[in-house]
Image: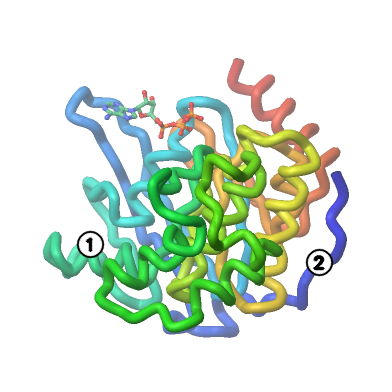
Amino acid sequence: MKRQWRGRTTATAEQTGTRHHALTLDGVTREYRSGVVALHPIHLTVPRGRFLAVMGPSGCGKSTLLQCAAGLDRPTAGTVRIGGTQLSSLNEAALTRLRRERIGFVFQAHHLVPSLSVAENVALPLMLGGESPGDRHLRALAAVGLGDRGGAVPSELSGGQCQRVAIARALVTTPDIVFADEPTGALDPAAAEEVLTLLRQAVDRDGHTVVMVTHDPFAAAWADEALYLMRGKLVWRQERPEAADIRRVLKELGGRTA
Ligand SMILES: Nc1ncnc2c1ncn2[C@@H]1O[C@H](COP(=O)(O)OP(=O)(O)OP(=O)(O)O)[C@@H](O)[C@H]1O
Protein backbone atom coordinates (compact mmCIF):
# COMPACT_ATOMS: atom_id res chain seq x y z
CA MET A 1 0.00 0.00 0.00
CA LYS A 2 1.51 3.31 -1.05
CA ARG A 3 0.55 6.87 -0.38
CA GLN A 4 -0.31 8.61 -3.59
CA TRP A 5 0.43 12.13 -2.53
CA ARG A 6 1.15 13.99 0.56
CA GLY A 7 -0.49 17.30 1.19
CA ARG A 8 0.72 20.76 1.61
CA THR A 9 3.02 21.65 4.44
CA THR A 10 1.01 22.07 7.62
CA ALA A 11 1.77 25.03 9.86
CA THR A 12 2.82 24.26 13.41
CA ALA A 13 0.54 24.95 16.36
CA GLU A 14 2.76 27.84 17.37
CA GLN A 15 2.42 29.42 13.94
CA THR A 16 -1.34 29.06 13.73
CA GLY A 17 -2.46 30.00 17.25
CA THR A 18 -5.04 28.26 19.44
CA ARG A 19 -8.18 29.25 17.50
CA HIS A 20 -6.85 27.34 14.51
CA HIS A 21 -6.43 24.16 16.49
CA ALA A 22 -8.99 21.53 15.69
CA LEU A 23 -8.19 19.76 18.97
CA THR A 24 -6.30 20.66 22.11
CA LEU A 25 -5.69 18.29 25.02
CA ASP A 26 -4.21 20.00 28.02
CA GLY A 27 -3.09 17.67 30.79
CA VAL A 28 -5.81 15.13 30.01
CA THR A 29 -5.81 12.34 32.56
CA ARG A 30 -8.23 9.42 32.87
CA GLU A 31 -8.27 7.21 35.90
CA TYR A 32 -10.93 4.52 36.10
CA ARG A 33 -12.67 3.68 39.35
CA SER A 34 -10.75 0.41 39.38
CA GLY A 35 -7.61 2.50 39.92
CA VAL A 36 -6.31 1.91 36.38
CA VAL A 37 -4.76 5.10 35.04
CA ALA A 38 -5.50 4.80 31.31
CA LEU A 39 -4.11 8.24 30.46
CA HIS A 40 -1.36 10.08 32.27
CA PRO A 41 -1.41 13.82 31.62
CA ILE A 42 -1.52 14.15 27.84
CA HIS A 43 -0.71 17.44 26.15
CA LEU A 44 -1.51 17.51 22.47
CA THR A 45 -2.55 20.07 19.88
CA VAL A 46 -3.81 19.14 16.45
CA PRO A 47 -3.82 22.04 13.98
CA ARG A 48 -6.58 22.20 11.41
CA GLY A 49 -5.80 20.40 8.18
CA ARG A 50 -3.73 17.70 9.84
CA PHE A 51 -3.92 13.91 9.54
CA LEU A 52 -2.72 12.30 12.75
CA ALA A 53 -2.31 8.57 13.44
CA VAL A 54 -2.45 7.30 17.01
CA MET A 55 -0.68 4.00 17.57
CA GLY A 56 0.42 1.80 20.42
CA PRO A 57 -0.05 -1.70 21.82
CA SER A 58 -3.35 -3.05 23.03
CA GLY A 59 -4.40 -1.46 26.32
CA CYS A 60 -2.08 1.58 25.98
CA GLY A 61 -5.03 3.99 26.09
CA LYS A 62 -5.81 4.77 22.45
CA SER A 63 -9.58 4.31 22.78
CA THR A 64 -9.65 6.21 26.04
CA LEU A 65 -7.78 9.08 24.39
CA LEU A 66 -10.21 9.12 21.48
CA GLN A 67 -13.24 8.96 23.76
CA CYS A 68 -12.02 11.82 25.94
CA ALA A 69 -11.06 13.88 22.87
CA ALA A 70 -14.48 13.31 21.28
CA GLY A 71 -16.46 14.14 24.42
CA LEU A 72 -17.73 10.57 24.78
CA ASP A 73 -15.91 10.23 28.09
CA ARG A 74 -14.97 12.91 30.60
CA PRO A 75 -11.32 13.09 31.71
CA THR A 76 -10.52 12.86 35.41
CA ALA A 77 -8.36 15.98 35.02
CA GLY A 78 -7.28 18.34 32.27
CA THR A 79 -9.17 20.06 29.49
CA VAL A 80 -10.25 19.16 25.96
CA ARG A 81 -11.02 21.81 23.35
CA ILE A 82 -12.62 21.13 20.00
CA GLY A 83 -12.14 24.09 17.68
CA GLY A 84 -11.63 26.35 20.71
CA THR A 85 -14.69 25.12 22.66
CA GLN A 86 -13.84 23.66 26.05
CA LEU A 87 -15.87 20.48 26.43
CA SER A 88 -16.11 20.63 30.23
CA SER A 89 -18.01 23.92 29.90
CA LEU A 90 -20.86 22.17 28.06
CA ASN A 91 -23.86 20.42 29.57
CA GLU A 92 -24.90 17.03 28.17
CA ALA A 93 -27.31 18.51 25.60
CA ALA A 94 -24.71 20.96 24.27
CA LEU A 95 -22.09 18.23 24.22
CA THR A 96 -24.40 15.97 22.22
CA ARG A 97 -25.02 18.80 19.76
CA LEU A 98 -21.30 19.51 19.43
CA ARG A 99 -20.60 15.84 18.76
CA ARG A 100 -23.31 15.74 16.11
CA GLU A 101 -22.41 19.00 14.37
CA ARG A 102 -18.70 19.46 14.88
CA ILE A 103 -17.24 15.97 15.11
CA GLY A 104 -17.29 13.22 12.50
CA PHE A 105 -16.89 9.58 13.52
CA VAL A 106 -15.71 6.62 11.49
CA PHE A 107 -15.48 3.28 13.26
CA GLN A 108 -14.15 -0.14 12.27
CA ALA A 109 -17.75 -1.22 11.64
CA HIS A 110 -19.58 1.25 9.45
CA HIS A 111 -22.74 1.44 11.64
CA LEU A 112 -24.98 2.47 8.74
CA VAL A 113 -28.72 2.22 9.38
CA PRO A 114 -29.73 -0.86 7.36
CA SER A 115 -33.30 0.26 6.65
CA LEU A 116 -32.29 3.64 5.22
CA SER A 117 -30.90 4.23 1.76
CA VAL A 118 -27.26 5.14 1.37
CA ALA A 119 -28.19 8.77 0.61
CA GLU A 120 -30.48 8.92 3.66
CA ASN A 121 -27.68 7.54 5.85
CA VAL A 122 -25.39 10.37 4.73
CA ALA A 123 -28.14 12.97 5.24
CA LEU A 124 -28.90 11.70 8.76
CA PRO A 125 -26.48 13.89 10.77
CA LEU A 126 -27.89 17.00 9.05
CA MET A 127 -31.50 15.95 9.58
CA LEU A 128 -30.89 15.05 13.24
CA GLY A 129 -29.58 18.58 13.64
CA GLY A 130 -32.79 19.96 12.12
CA GLU A 131 -31.10 21.04 8.89
CA SER A 132 -32.47 20.46 5.45
CA PRO A 133 -29.76 18.51 3.64
CA GLY A 134 -30.38 20.17 0.26
CA ASP A 135 -27.88 18.41 -1.96
CA ARG A 136 -25.07 18.34 0.60
CA HIS A 137 -25.47 14.62 1.25
CA LEU A 138 -25.42 13.92 -2.48
CA ARG A 139 -22.26 15.96 -2.94
CA ALA A 140 -20.64 14.17 0.02
CA LEU A 141 -21.58 10.83 -1.54
CA ALA A 142 -20.19 11.89 -4.92
CA ALA A 143 -16.94 12.94 -3.21
CA VAL A 144 -16.39 9.35 -2.05
CA GLY A 145 -17.11 8.02 -5.54
CA LEU A 146 -20.58 6.67 -4.79
CA GLY A 147 -22.76 9.35 -6.35
CA ASP A 148 -24.64 6.72 -8.34
CA ARG A 149 -25.43 4.45 -5.35
CA GLY A 150 -27.52 6.82 -3.23
CA GLY A 151 -30.68 4.78 -3.76
CA ALA A 152 -29.15 1.48 -2.64
CA VAL A 153 -29.44 0.13 0.88
CA PRO A 154 -26.23 -0.71 2.79
CA SER A 155 -26.67 -4.48 2.36
CA GLU A 156 -26.33 -4.01 -1.41
CA LEU A 157 -22.85 -2.49 -1.00
CA SER A 158 -19.48 -4.09 -0.25
CA GLY A 159 -17.77 -3.56 3.11
CA GLY A 160 -15.36 -1.07 1.54
CA GLN A 161 -18.20 0.84 -0.12
CA CYS A 162 -20.09 0.98 3.20
CA GLN A 163 -17.00 2.41 4.86
CA ARG A 164 -16.83 5.06 2.11
CA VAL A 165 -20.45 5.94 2.88
CA ALA A 166 -19.50 6.19 6.55
CA ILE A 167 -16.78 8.66 5.57
CA ALA A 168 -19.29 10.72 3.57
CA ARG A 169 -21.59 10.71 6.61
CA ALA A 170 -18.70 11.82 8.85
CA LEU A 171 -17.79 14.70 6.52
CA VAL A 172 -21.26 15.93 5.55
CA THR A 173 -21.52 18.39 8.45
CA THR A 174 -18.05 19.84 7.66
CA PRO A 175 -16.91 18.99 11.20
CA ASP A 176 -13.98 20.55 13.05
CA ILE A 177 -12.42 17.10 13.34
CA VAL A 178 -12.98 13.51 12.27
CA PHE A 179 -12.12 10.69 14.67
CA ALA A 180 -11.51 7.40 12.91
CA ASP A 181 -11.11 4.32 15.11
CA GLU A 182 -9.46 1.50 13.12
CA PRO A 183 -11.34 2.53 9.96
CA THR A 184 -9.50 -0.04 7.84
CA GLY A 185 -9.44 -2.81 10.45
CA ALA A 186 -12.15 -4.90 8.77
CA LEU A 187 -11.15 -4.26 5.15
CA ASP A 188 -9.01 -6.05 2.59
CA PRO A 189 -5.89 -4.15 1.44
CA ALA A 190 -7.50 -2.69 -1.71
CA ALA A 191 -10.58 -1.39 0.14
CA ALA A 192 -8.33 -0.13 2.94
CA GLU A 193 -6.30 1.84 0.45
CA GLU A 194 -9.46 3.44 -0.95
CA VAL A 195 -10.53 4.48 2.53
CA LEU A 196 -7.09 5.91 3.35
CA THR A 197 -7.00 7.75 0.03
CA LEU A 198 -10.34 9.37 0.89
CA LEU A 199 -9.20 10.41 4.36
CA ARG A 200 -5.97 11.81 2.89
CA GLN A 201 -7.95 13.72 0.24
CA ALA A 202 -10.35 15.08 2.85
CA VAL A 203 -7.34 16.62 4.59
CA ASP A 204 -5.36 17.77 1.56
CA ARG A 205 -8.14 18.89 -0.73
CA ASP A 206 -10.83 20.05 1.67
CA GLY A 207 -8.82 21.05 4.76
CA HIS A 208 -10.43 18.52 7.11
CA THR A 209 -8.66 17.32 10.23
CA VAL A 210 -8.44 13.58 10.92
CA VAL A 211 -7.28 11.71 14.01
CA MET A 212 -7.07 7.99 13.27
CA VAL A 213 -6.37 5.17 15.70
CA THR A 214 -4.72 2.25 13.99
CA HIS A 215 -2.61 -0.81 14.67
CA ASP A 216 -1.47 -0.92 11.06
CA PRO A 217 1.87 0.75 10.16
CA PHE A 218 0.78 0.95 6.50
CA ALA A 219 -2.34 2.88 7.48
CA ALA A 220 -0.37 5.15 9.82
CA ALA A 221 2.06 5.92 6.99
CA TRP A 222 -0.72 7.87 5.27
CA ALA A 223 -0.77 10.37 8.12
CA ASP A 224 1.23 13.58 8.50
CA GLU A 225 2.32 12.45 11.93
CA ALA A 226 2.19 9.30 14.03
CA LEU A 227 1.92 9.31 17.80
CA TYR A 228 2.81 6.36 19.97
CA LEU A 229 1.16 5.72 23.30
CA MET A 230 2.59 3.35 25.89
CA ARG A 231 0.78 2.69 29.17
CA GLY A 232 -1.17 5.91 28.85
CA LYS A 233 1.81 8.11 28.04
CA LEU A 234 2.77 9.81 24.81
CA VAL A 235 6.22 8.37 24.26
CA TRP A 236 7.04 8.98 20.62
CA ARG A 237 5.99 11.27 17.78
CA GLN A 238 7.11 11.03 14.21
CA GLU A 239 6.51 13.48 11.39
CA ARG A 240 5.89 12.07 7.92
CA PRO A 241 6.11 8.46 9.08
CA GLU A 242 7.07 5.66 6.74
CA ALA A 243 5.68 2.17 7.33
CA ALA A 244 9.15 0.64 7.78
CA ASP A 245 10.11 3.26 10.40
CA ILE A 246 6.86 2.72 12.24
CA ARG A 247 7.33 -1.05 12.31
CA ARG A 248 10.85 -0.59 13.68
CA VAL A 249 9.69 1.87 16.35
CA LEU A 250 6.80 -0.37 17.38
CA LYS A 251 9.21 -3.29 17.70
CA GLU A 252 11.67 -1.24 19.74
CA LEU A 253 8.98 0.10 22.04
CA GLY A 254 7.45 -3.34 22.44
CA GLY A 255 10.86 -4.79 23.22
CA ARG A 256 11.65 -2.09 25.74
CA THR A 257 8.54 -2.72 27.76
CA ALA A 258 8.29 -6.50 27.40
N1 LIG B 1 -14.30 1.15 31.54
C1 LIG B 1 -13.10 0.80 31.99
N2 LIG B 1 -12.92 0.51 33.30
C2 LIG B 1 -11.70 0.18 33.80
N3 LIG B 1 -10.58 0.10 33.05
C3 LIG B 1 -10.71 0.37 31.75
C4 LIG B 1 -11.96 0.73 31.14
N4 LIG B 1 -11.75 0.93 29.82
C5 LIG B 1 -10.44 0.72 29.61
N5 LIG B 1 -9.80 0.38 30.75
C6 LIG B 1 -8.37 0.10 30.91
O1 LIG B 1 -7.68 1.27 30.50
C7 LIG B 1 -6.51 0.92 29.79
C8 LIG B 1 -6.55 1.53 28.40
O2 LIG B 1 -7.62 0.92 27.65
P1 LIG B 1 -7.96 1.35 26.15
O3 LIG B 1 -9.18 0.59 25.76
O4 LIG B 1 -8.01 2.82 26.09
O5 LIG B 1 -6.69 0.82 25.34
P2 LIG B 1 -6.47 0.64 23.77
O6 LIG B 1 -5.09 1.09 23.50
O7 LIG B 1 -7.56 1.32 23.04
O8 LIG B 1 -6.58 -0.92 23.57
P3 LIG B 1 -6.98 -1.77 22.25
O9 LIG B 1 -5.97 -1.46 21.22
O10 LIG B 1 -6.91 -3.18 22.74
O11 LIG B 1 -8.37 -1.34 21.87
C9 LIG B 1 -6.44 -0.60 29.79
O12 LIG B 1 -5.62 -1.01 30.88
C10 LIG B 1 -7.88 -1.01 30.02
O13 LIG B 1 -7.94 -2.26 30.67
Residue 193: x percent and y percent?
77, 48
Task: Please name the residue that numbered disc 1 is placed on.
Answer: 96
Locate the N terminus and report the quarter of the image it occupies: top right
Mark 2 — residue? Answer: 6
Left or right: where does residue 90 sit relative to residue 130? Answer: left
Q: In this view, does 82 lie above or below 16?
A: above
Residue 215, image quadrant: top right
Within 8 Å: ligand 1 and the Cβ of disc 1? Answer: no
| Residue ID at (61%, 45%) | 157
For badge 2, the amino acid type reads: Arg
Question: Is 78 situated left or right of 93 in this image?
Answer: right
Look at 58% across and 34% down and name the residue there. Answer: 56
Quadrant hosting residue 197: bottom right
Please state the horizontal and vertical placement of residue 74, each as a whole percent of the image. Answer: 23, 50
In front of the other: 49 or 115: 115
Q: Is residue 235 visible?
A: no
Identify the secondary structure beneath mark 2.
loop
Q: Is residue 178 above or below residue 85?
A: above
